[in-house]
Image: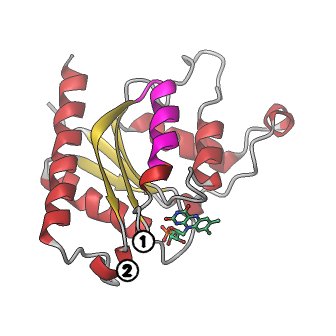
Amino acid sequence: MSAVRVLAFAGSLRKGSYNKKLAKQFAAAAERAGAQVTVLDLADYPMPIFDEDVEAEQFPERAAAFKEQLRRHDAFIIACPEYNSSITAALKNAIDWASRKTTDDEAPLEAFKGKVVALAAASPGGFGGLRGLVPVRMLLGNIGCLVLPQQLAIPHVQKVMAEDGSIGEEAIQKQVDSIAQALVDTATHQRAG
Ligand SMILES: Cc1cc2nc3c(=O)[nH]c(=O)nc-3n(C[C@H](O)[C@H](O)[C@H](O)COP(=O)(O)O)c2cc1C
């Protein structure tokens, strides 16, 4: 059987994003676990704030391209910053666009249904972005994703993550490896079933 396809991305647009670096750490771990991994930068998919009038006029090309990336993969790794104890606007907006049909013959929520998801967060703050993962988990579950119960939130990330994204604490790196392994195992199982 071919390797499971995993898409890793962050819910942050900023260049120096800790969460982009964390998504890359998970991507490398998923590759070691045998997956075929694509790393995506949401900043490469600029899209307007979702508006049904804009959608009716013309579905934005980059929103469609982002949705196509989701469609092509079996599983997602999403590292999402916490903004005001919730999901970032960039991630919510991208999900809203990708939840919409782009052709008449596609099934509802085709980009999300049955996809296995691993969630992570990193923050300079003391909660590590943990509170923001609650709404992310809820909404992805409600649109048909299977969100792994295991997740990682890294508090005071500036103390444990180097400039290149490497993680200085062995216990945290082990969690990254174990969640990535669980993602690949679950996605493999899902595909077989
Ligand atoms: C609008 C806004 C709201 C924020 N709210 C929170 C918050 O509720 N909890 C938290 O831990 N950090 C919060 N932060 C700080 C972010 O965790 C920090 O900027 C982090 O580096 C963002 O993730 P990134 O590095 O992946 O871009 C907030 C930042 C912004 C810009």
Determine whether label 2 and label 1 are within 8 Å by CB: yes
Examine the rendered structure and indicate whether residue 15 appears above or below residue 59.
below
**Amino acid at dot 1:** Tyr
Q: Is residue 121 magenta?
A: no
Residue identifier under label 2:
158
Identify the image quadrant of the N terminus.
top left
> Left of 106 or right of it: where is 35?
left
Numbered label attached to residue 125: none
Q: Earlier in the sequence, mark 2 or mark 1?
A: 1
Where residue 62 appears, x then y in whole percent?
Answer: 64, 50
**Amino acid at dot 2:** Gln
Q: Is residue 141 magenta?
A: yes
Q: Residue at x 13, y 70 (%)?
A: 170
Q: Main secondary structure of the magenta part?
A: helix
For ligand 1, the image quadrant comes to bottom right
Where residue 36 appears, x then y in whole percent?
Answer: 25, 48
Label 1 beta carbon less than 8 Å to ligand 1: yes
Determine whether the residue tagged by mark 2 lies in a helix, strand or loop: helix
> Left of 168 or right of it: where is 142?
right
Examine the rendered structure and indicate whether residue 153 appears above or below residue 148.
below
Residue 118, by quadrant, is top left
Where residue 103 appears, x then y in whole percent?
Answer: 64, 24
> Left of 107 or right of it: where is 120?
left
Q: In the image, which residues are magenta?
A: 133-145
Residue identifier under label 1:
18
Q: Residue most toward the front?
A: 126
Neighbour tally class for label 1: few under 14, some 14-19, many 20 plus, Cα within 10 Å: many
Where residue 63 appears, x then y in whole percent?
Answer: 64, 45
